[in-house]
Image (cartoon, rainbow, N blue to C red):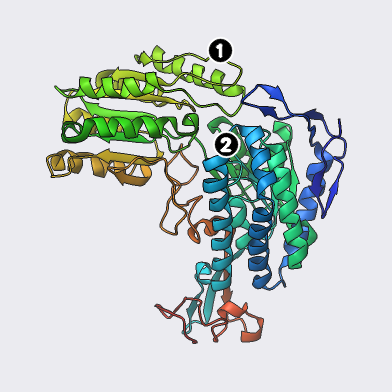
Amino acid sequence: MAVQPVLIAGAWRASENPVAFFTAVNPASKTPLPEQYPVSGAEDVALAIQAGQEAAAALHPTPTAALAHFLNCLAENIEARADSLIETAHRETALPAEPRLRSIELPRTTNQLRQAAAAVRDGSWRRATIDTGSNIRAIYAPLGGPVVVFGPNNFPFAFNSAAGGDFAAAIAAGNPVIAKANPGHPGTTRLLAEAAFAAVRASGLPPAMVQMIYHTPPELGLQLVSDKRIGGTAFTGSRAAGLALKAAADKAGKPIYLEMSSVNPLFILPGAIRERGAEIASELYASCTLAAGQFCTKPGLVILQQDENSDGFIAAVQAHFTQNVPGTLLNQAGPTSIAQAITTLQEHGAEIVTGGRELNEARFAFANTLLQVTGDHFLAHPHELQTEAFGPVSLLVTATDGKQMAEIATHLDGSLTGTIYAHSQGADDNGYAQIEPLLRHKVGRLLNDKMPTGVAVVPAMNHGGPFPATGHPGFTAVGIPPALLRFAALHCYDNVRQHRLPPELRDKNPNRHMWRLIDGNWTQGDV
């Protein structure tokens, strides 16, 4: 069985002294796929870091137009390879080829690459600031070293380390990328890295602008993010792995941006249940089980008030969870981790309404699972009852009244999203006014009368939130241009002569489109 090469220092090459090998597994059949991949050792990591640092230095005189050309070229290359990408991703993840991969996720991926290219051409994201009185000027600029991107397993295209949102943002900000593939879809990442490397050559960028390794031992991952030549890191994955990487990066003073666990609390006020409970029950089921519940924005915690309508609503939700066939999980670890999370919830008062077991099938699957706990139990164990179950699982919390619903909101951990369903004619306005100010500071994105599992790639999107959803509440992983700021440093120039300044900070606006803050006024004009 041939071992797949890694992309390091501007060439596809055999891994240097790999420490192990692995294969991906088809989740729909539990069968290993034929391709073999190396687990890179210290030699690969050292060479990638050095090549990435040299690429960052070589980028300094490169026109930003080359970055925009690269991003557009990569989008075109992905579209040209769509059939092989979709086939490979489907085999490695069991996500449906249509509509999920072909009609939803692949277009999202190419769209965000093109948005990043447009942001590069415009330049306004760099927030050029000029104070003529002091002759001090500042602009956001590259970090001066490669950015390491760790991709998750649940979005093989849109969050892929070699083509996804973090990758696009890091490149658009002017940084080389070292892509760490997710071992769940290494073949998909290899194909995307091939498309990216072809775009590198077509754009005239440094050959090591994009590098890719498949896997490393944990200790080498910690060394990678903490190396002094690294510019920064983006990570999407489990809380345990994210916090270990963050500790290593923080100790070395290196920026790292994390997306970790999130239960995405959803409050359903009494008037909403009374008005349209059956409709909300259907929406809740669909959101909780979308992609087998493996969305980071899945509503895993649902808070409602116990009253004459709540039992009927819970029964309607239970019927949806019980009657519908669960989706296929991404890997063999899924059922085990879900079962462990459910055990934690049960140990702290939650009771299973339906589901709660791994399915004995020829695929990786777990029964659609609904649990229930009282508001009193939740307030006694708020931390444990916010344990994330990454699968088709949700916990219903029944509060005694509106006051207890608000108290529950004060004990929530940070999440990516928070939602409030309310009566359309204002019957829940008082309840909304109680809960919203408390929930607002617990989440990155607040929704009203809408499930949170859709994430639009628009400039106003915040795919971030307070800890433990992320490592910093001030940044987003989705939404261009704001996502670019994670991978930029603020460069200040004091009394530097015009011809020595970056073009964006000279008196003349370099493209007539870039917005600059000149003496306190945003303008596209010259000084």
* Amino acid type, residue under disc 2 in the picture: Gly
What is the quadrant of residue 66 in the picture? Answer: bottom right
Q: Nearer the viewer, residue 34 or 271?
A: 34
Q: Which residue is mark 2?
A: 242
Q: Position of residue 505 (x, y in %)?
A: 56, 79
Residue 132 visible in the displayed image: yes
**Reading the chain from its start, which is encountered first: label 1 or label 2?**
2
Q: Residue at x 65, y 22 (%)?
A: 29
The kind of secondary structure element at disc 2 is helix
Q: Nearer the viewer, residue 28 or 151?
A: 28
Q: Nearer the viewer, residue 406 or 34?
A: 34
Residue 448 vertical placement versus 172 (above, below): above
* Amino acid type, residue under disc 1 in the picture: Asn
Q: Which residue is mark 1?
A: 360
Q: Position of residue 164 (x, y in %)?
A: 60, 50
Q: Position of residue 238 (x, y in %)?
A: 55, 32
- Count of residue discs: 2
What is the quadrant of residue 44 in the picture? Answer: top right
Q: Nearer the viewer, residue 187 or 486?
A: 187
The kind of secondary structure element at disc 1 is loop
- Is the residue marked by circle 2 packed among few (<14), some (14-19), or many (20+) residues within 10 Å? many
